Amino acid sequence: MSRDVPQIPYSEVTPKHLYLSRREFIAGAGAAAVASGILGEAYAAALQAKPSQYRVDEKLTPKDAVTTYNNFYEFGTEKGAPGLASRDFKPLPWTVKIDGLVDKPREFDMSELIEKMPLEERIYRMRCVEAWSMVIPWIGFPLSALLQQVEPLGSAKYVAFTSVLRPEEMPGQRGIFQVLDWPYVEGLRLDEAMHPLTILSVGLYGETLPNANGAPIRLVVPWKYGFKGIKSITRISFMEEQPPTSWNLMAPDEYGFYANVNPEVDHPRWSQATERRIGEDSFFGSGRRDTLMFNGYGEQVASLYSGMNLHRFY
Ligand SMILES: Nc1nc2c(c(=O)[nH]1)N[C@H]1C(S)=C(S)[C@@H](COP(=O)(O)O)O[C@H]1N2
Ligand SMILES: [Mo]
């Protein structure tokens, strides 16, 4: 393992949590403090995540790579753009609205999510549709824990997600040549959304989520291509019909709704059989590895798709 990869979670080595528990943080912070600069530090201290059982046993991608090699088109299309152009983005205060086919539609403040949701550190293998991959220590909680709070109706079959629309803080939303329409939207079938592997992430490497990675809250679905992992979420809606998704709208032949990682179903313009692990030396080809069916999570998720033609529903 490289020098900068922590052997134990940040939450266990930082002294901050010794003087500030999550509950105390929330009680002390209050809604007013959410807008103040003080929150940044208190909020970081509140991220007490226990290591979970969900940990792939692979070398972590160095934090530098995780936070500077990104796709976040709201900040530009180059991999380095989000890290640079997101510096003035203000992830707090923040709320997530949950509505649609639910009994109790509600808006949640970030501080409430940090307090109430069962935060864990999970080490997930991540695979981008562009054939690169990373191993990331996320802090997050099961999406199902949040969705249960609003009591979905029986008619709900899908969950739709919407990213923030803030052209004044997101240069990629202001440009003349736009690859995607804004806001970025994504969706999951309800059973995918409720699956225990599906999380909302609020941090990585023991710290709050960097802006480039989707602060303050983003989706992580480790058996799907990275574009399903919508960033900076402001709204989650329960729907009866399959919701539109940004990359599918842009190029339906190239990016499907399901987007399950599948080495046997190639992208029309490149193979999906192998991938380049970011941060590993690839000069002699050692960084290239085989892509795994469902990104290696088949045992947990294959049953969701039994009987489905995965070439047709790509
Ligand atoms: N709002 C929004 N979410 C997004 C994207 C984006 O452009 N905008 N890019 C997606 C793609 S293609 C990938 S691979 C992942 C990258 O996440 P990371 O930069 O944290 O590794 O974010 C996804 N979520
Ligand atoms: Mo991606």
Image: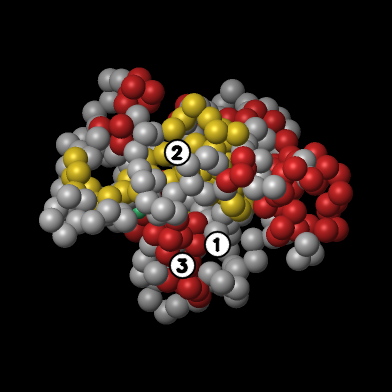
- For image coordinates 56% across by 72% down, the residue present is 87
Residues at discs 2 and 1 in contact (Cβ within 8 Å): no
The percent position of residue 277, horizontal first and vertical second, equals 27, 50
Residues at discs 1 and 3 in contact (Cβ within 8 Å): yes
Q: CA distance from mark 3 to mark 2?
A: 23 Å
- The tag earlier along the polypeptide, 3 or 2, is 3
Q: Residues within 10 Å of mark 1 (few under 14, many from 20)?
A: many
Between 144 and 37, which is closer to the camera in this rendering? Answer: 37
Between 237 and 93, which is closer to the camera in this rendering? Answer: 93
Q: Is residue 310 visible?
A: yes
Q: Residues within 10 Å of mark 3 (few under 14, many from 20)?
A: many
Name the amino acid type tagged 3: Pro
Name the amino acid type tagged 1: Asn
- For image coordinates 23% across by 40% down, the residue present is 291
Of labels 3 and 2, the one closer to you: 2
Residue hosting label 3: 82
- The tag earlier along the polypeptide, 2 or 1, is 2
Residue hosting label 2: 123
> Is disc 3's CB within 8 Å of ligand 1?
yes
Residue hosting label 1: 211
The percent position of residue 48, horizontal first and vertical second, equals 66, 41
Q: CA distance from mark 2 to mark 1?
A: 20 Å
- For image coordinates 67% across by 52% down, the residue present is 44
The percent position of residue 198, horizontal first and vertical second, equals 49, 34
Name the amino acid type tagged 2: Ile
